[in-house]
Image: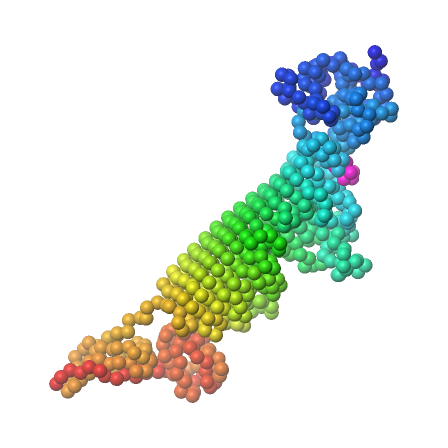
Amino acid sequence: MATPSEPQSSMARRTMLAALGAGGLTLTAAAGAGAAERSAVPAAGPTMRALLAFDFCLTTTVDQLRAETAPQANYLYYVADAGKEGVFKHDPADTTSADDTGLVLVSTNGKRFKRVFSRDEVRVTWFGATGDGSTDDHDRIQAAIDAVSQLGGGTVYFPAGTYIVSPKTNERRIRLRSKVNLRGEGDNSVLKVKDNAGDYWVILGGFWGEDIVRDVSISHLKIDQNVAANTSCFINGPATQPGRDATGDLWWRQFCIGLFNYDNIEVDHVTFAPTCGVNSVVINNYQCRNARISNCVFDFVKAKGDRNYDNSAIYVNGVAHTITGNRFRAAVEEMAFGAMETHGAQSVVSNNISDGYITGVNAQSSEYGGDIADMTITGNTFSNAAHGIQLWPRKDRPVRNVTIAGNTVSLANKTHNRSGMMGIGTFPGEFMPDTSPFENIVITGNTVLYQEEFEQREVLWEQYAFGIGLMRANDMTNVVIADNVIKNPPLTGIVIGNREKKGTSTNVAVTGNVITNPGHYPAKAERFRAGILVQSAVFGARITDNTIIDTYAQAKGLYAIRANEAEGSYAHVVIRDNLVRSKQGGLWLDLAPGIETDEVRERIAFTPSFPPQSGTFDAGDLLWVTGEVSGPAAPVGYRVLGSGTAGTLTGVTGTGTAGTAKLTVNDAAALRVGQVIVIATGNQVRRIVQIGGTTVRLDRNLDAAASASAVGFAAPRFAPFATVDA
């Protein structure tokens, strides 16, 4: 029997078995009873009993094994190279397998040595990956994935270390294979992009049009895009970067994980830090299904590129996908646009936390999918955002069957200083003017908190500044907005419809919401300073049992509820039983004729003597005198013919501009909402509808300008209708 070449040394069976574990081979207890072990040999690997039947186990190196020309049939070879440790055996039946450096080694005269391993896990270091933070391990990682793919699947395992990868434009990336998982030791196993990698499409993944990738899990890894050390890239846009192809150059996207033809993909417990690409994870094909991104961490740092390049940490398009338990972090100045973007049907976005991202989640119907959306967005927390949750349709595909519940949204609207700000609502139609409808939308139990804003900005799209709103020019049917808490919305608390008066809202319920300090921002268009704003065509709506509060010492809001006839048409609309409170002046309830509202106040009043000394009386009221009356045919009852306020108002002057409904007074202490006043200049009679500080809102515009004009009460006009006989 030929003797193996020196300098190999023999190893006793007991020592060999101990070494097997150190080399990445774990023999299960069942192995001793004849269970098959995993092997690079196509047939079933050896059992424990079979291994014990071998005569010797010899220590060697990869180089020595490749130089072995006369292997013994009953020898095992223990490779001792650091990171590549493990047991190999000669396979005399194989004359064709290629040397892949990890599972198959081929000697100089064509002998094939196969690694023996017992579990569905292959170490990337077996293929020469060093994880030393300086050596480029890109090709070695690819070799490990390809080798496991050839075995029919399994897991490529990354021991603790920093593995340098070198993606490049559309030329170079690590290709994922079906049924091949990647797993590491959490943040201790790092895939790091090399210094100055320049532009690249993706680190792990593929391109459009490639074969489908199925059944892949990527877990317990960290991906470091090495943002600060990549000064030769430029994200977002061929059109903005000289020397680039403005029509077809897309290879600057810098995705971390990207798949465009997929089924059953999981990304779990992966840290992306720092991450900078247009998407960190993009799983995008409307025809595909089953994507799960969970328990990941995203720390966004802006790369070299356009200041406002578009980005979302997670972008998923397809059917049946879940995004759960992830954390997103970014400093406001980094311009992290979106934490999550989801397209398609049957999506669940739950229990995620973002801090500093401009938008928490964008949820859109599929461009080419079916007629359902079936979206559930629950239990998320979005802090220091400008927009919490945005919905929008795509082309002729509706947003249908959506539940948004139990989310907490805290907006740093003043800090971000974006042109729009919203807690939960529809994406502005000016940017994507798709006209497909919204149907079966439930928004309930959410909390939205704003920073207060008392100074007018240079740029603010006031129609896109609201707590909760469905305001696109689309039809909306079966909408429930209930039991939400909205605090300090600078403009509108809740809005239905749009200023263009396009689309019809049908079957709408806005109930049980608490809105505090709406409309305190000095808006250019005062219609948006409302607790609840209803616009466009509305057919069937119930706005009831909401609480709208202004807590400022001098009222800053303007309207409690506005449904003005100039801004929409209203049929079968009920607005009643809402609680409106303010410390000063009240909030204006501006409702179009025909809206069913609270029962008219009691139309009968009483006074101990006539004429009354105080109180406001409206035409049609009845006034009864409760004190003694004397004289023949003395009246005891009066009908109010002209509305007015009884009593005397002295020392009050007002200034206002013709064509406006505002009057600035020197002293508002004696004024109340509902009183009828007369402005001496032009003898203008107006009713007070709101008071904020010394600014008095009137029910109609002034016909003539007033400058420090005397203001008094306009007396009501009475006519007797009952007498006492002499």
Q: Residue 286: x percent and y percent? A: 63, 50
Q: Is residue 16 left or right of residue 702?
A: right
Residue 701 is inside the magenta segment: no
Vertical side of 645 occupied by 167: above or below: above
Q: Residue furthest right?
A: 109
Q: How is the image coloured?
A: rainbow
Q: Judge whether 83 appears above or below 318 on screen.
A: above
| 314 w.r.t. 386: above or below | above
- Which range is magenta? 135-141
> Relative to the observer, which residue lies in front, 13 or 670?
13
Residue found at x 40% / y 73%: 593
Q: With 645 as the anchor, is 29 left or right in this view?
A: right
Q: Is residue 181 above or below residue 681?
A: above
Q: Nearer the viewer, residue 350 or 335?
A: 350
The answer to whether one can see residue 541 in this image is: yes
Q: Residue at x 67, y 22 (%)?
A: 37
Task: Write the residue at 26% across / 74% down.
Answer: 604
Question: Is residue 414 visible in this depiction of the protein?
Answer: no
Point 79% across, 58% down: residue: 245
Quarter of the image with the C terminus is: bottom left
Out of 99 and 57, give the one closest to the viewer: 99
The image quarter containing residue 699 is: bottom left
| Residue 140 within the magenta-colored segment of the rendering | yes
x and y percentages locating residue 30 in the rendered image:
62, 19
Q: Residue furthest left?
A: 726
How many circles with numbers are drawn on the protein? 0
Quick one: quadrant of the N terminus?
Answer: top right
Q: Position of residue 42 (x, y in %)?
A: 73, 26
Q: Check the image and name the residue furthest to the top.
A: 1
Foreground of the two, 355 or 544: 544
List x then y, in percent, for residue 418: 60, 62
